Amino acid sequence: MHTTAVSYHAEAGIAVVQLATAGHDTLDYRSIGTAIREKRIEVREVNDAGSVNSLLVLNHADLPIFLMDGDILIGAKQNRVINTSILLAPQSKTIIPVSCVEQGRWRSTSPTFSSSDYIAPTSLRSAKSKQVNDSLRSIHLHQSDQGEVWDRVSVLNSLHDVQSPTQSLSDAFTTREKEFDTFIASFEAHPEANGLAVFNSGGMLCLDVFNRRDVHREYFKKILRGVAMEVSQLAKGKAPAGEAEASYKAIDFIDTFEAAEHESFDGVGLGVEKRFDTGERAGFGLFHLDQLVHLTTLQMDSRRPPARKRRPPLE
């Protein structure tokens, strides 16, 4: 997978390197956001009673639909975050693994879910990725530590002084939406890119590479909004990596990933996941027909959020 950096931009305490790989646009699929808007898919609770950590997705389309790790789904009985990247088969019904990011609500506000215009912040995604790695090794399921996910949502809301009656991650994004959009306003998706790496003064926060350039464009601002939630208040710190350093590190990581040993697991839908956990970084590559669908690597946050008194289980 030959990779080149096609653009670099630094501002607001972060730097973004956009990447182009030789093997892009080799698969035909659509993103969940596009599919929901076009009514090609429905995302529902698994049944009338619901299940906190599972959802039902009906793909009515004649082509695969891509769901990204960290995608936030809004509505139904409570908001969820998707636990891993998924490529749904055409004309399929699939139970997908999710985590709750709205602890205090268990009542229906809509029959189906809608897609948000942001994804989960890096610390939540990285912690969840490690938890899923551990779960796959032990019980062969894409499960998270729901208690820690709730704790991280609480910490993120506290960071932005957001009082959420249902402890919802979405309340922080809604409250600070203009602030986050201002933070990332100068960043634009490059038309030739199919991936991006985001840096701050602490190094590379996240790297996401997609098979399709149009899907990269769809997720570009969504990923940056998730980053902004964590680093927007730290923008006056040390400058992020310069262009040469950042580009080298991003390309070198992809080369390292290709050469490294991985643990392989069946994908939730189509394809195979090649997962890794180095202690400093966690992530995976989702492959279908020997083609990369999505590669993600996330900087690990070793600080577990402080435990807090939890509400009774929702099931």
Image (spheres, grey):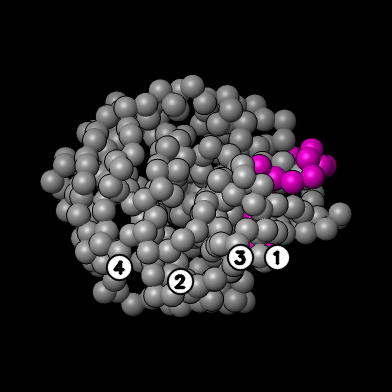
Mark 1 → mark 2, Cα distance in angstroms:
18 Å
Is mark 2 in CB contact (under 8 Å) with mark 3? no
Circle 3 Cα neighbour tier, 10 Å, few/some/many (<14 / 14–19 / ≥20): some
Q: Say which label, 1 or 4, has the lower sequence index.
A: 1
The answer to whether one can see residue 113 in this image is yes
**Identity, as a three-letter code, of the amino acid under mark 1:** Lys
Q: CA distance from mark 4 to mark 3?
A: 29 Å
Q: Residue at x 70, y 45 (%)?
A: 113
**Residue at point 20%, 54% (across, down):** 4
Q: Over which residues does the magenta segment extend?
A: 95-114
Q: Earlier in the sequence, mark 4 or mark 2?
A: 4
Q: Nearer the viewer, residue 231 or 40?
A: 40
* Above or below: residue 311 compared with residue 269: above
Quick check: can you spot residue 308?
A: no
Identify the secondary structure beneath mark 3.
loop
* Residue receiving disc 3: 90
Asked whether 195 or 183 is in front, the reply is 195
Mark 1–mark 4 Cα distance, whole angstroms, equals: 32 Å
- Image spot of residue 73 (x, y percent): 63, 45
For image coordinates 25% across by 62% down, the residue present is: 22
State whether residue 186 is above or below residue 254: above
Q: Which residue is mark 1?
A: 93
Q: From the image, which quarter does the N terminus lie in?
A: bottom left
